[in-house]
Structure formats: C-alpha cells, structure tokens
Image (cartoon, rainbow, N blue to C red):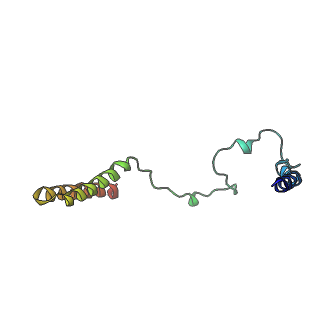
Amino acid sequence: MRFLAIGSFALAVLALPAVSSGQQLTQNAPKGPTLQAAAVGFRSTEAKVDASTKITAAPIRRNQGQDVALMVVGVGAMIVGALVEDTAGTIIIIGGAGMALYGLYNYLAY
C-alpha cells in the first residue's frame, strides 16, 4: 500500500509541470479590456449586409402555457372520466375532451 501511495504521488509530481502550463498567456493576446470582448451578441464576419438577406422572424407568442395547461387538464379529465363509471364518467369525459380541444384550437390558431 505504501508503494502505491508513493508511486501515485511521484506520478502526480512529475505530471504537475505539464498540466500547469496550460493556463499561461500567449504573447499575441492583448492585455486589458477590449471593445471586442465588451460586445454582446453575435458577430458578423461580413461587413456588408444586404436588405435581401434579412429574414423576418415569426413573432414570439406569449402565454402559450395557458393553452398547454388546458390541453393537459382536459386529457386528465378524460382519464378520470374513464375511471368513473356510468353517466357521470361520460359527462366528465365529454367535458375534458371539450377543454382539451379548446386548448388545442387556441394553441394552433394563434
């Protein structure tokens, strides 16, 4: 056990100089803050941008969570209605299906 501990310590000591040189700065790196480092966002490699290359993105739709919640609760109500027997279960299934379809309609329509 002693030889294993001494051997692993010796290996770590021999490998330490090779690992520690990985964080040294290169000679070409500018010192201090630069404008390039302060820029936030994507950088374009081409200086000229054509108006024909601009793509209009689809508008970001807010409040999609409510539509998804309607679908999930509707499907949950359909499952509960399947577990409940007789007329009450049928009414719960139909109500859950209506809620899920309404949520799906709102999710796909807008």
* Looking at the image, residue 53 lies above or below residue 41: below
- Which residue is found at the position 11% from the left and 60% from the top? 86
- Return the x and y of residue 62 as percentages of the image width and height: 40, 47
* Looking at the image, residue 36 lies above or below residue 100: above
Relative placement, left or right, of 93 versus 56 is left
Q: Residue furthest top?
A: 32
Q: Nearer the viewer, residue 104 or 40?
A: 104
Relative placement, left or right, of 44 versus 7 is left
- Return the x and y of residue 106 as percentages of the image width and height: 30, 54
Image quadrant containing the N terminus: bottom right
- Return the x and y of residue 73 as percentages of the image width and height: 28, 52
- Which residue is found at the position 83% from the left and 44% from the top? 30
Image quadrant containing the C terminus: bottom left
> How many numbered discs sit on the rendered protein?
0
Q: Residue furthest front?
A: 1
Relative placement, left or right, of 48 versus 105 is right
- Return the x and y of residue 32 as percentages of the image width and height: 80, 38
Quadrant assignment, res 3: bottom right
Q: Nearer the viewer, residue 33 or 24?
A: 24
- Which residue is found at the position 73% from the left and 45% from the top? 36
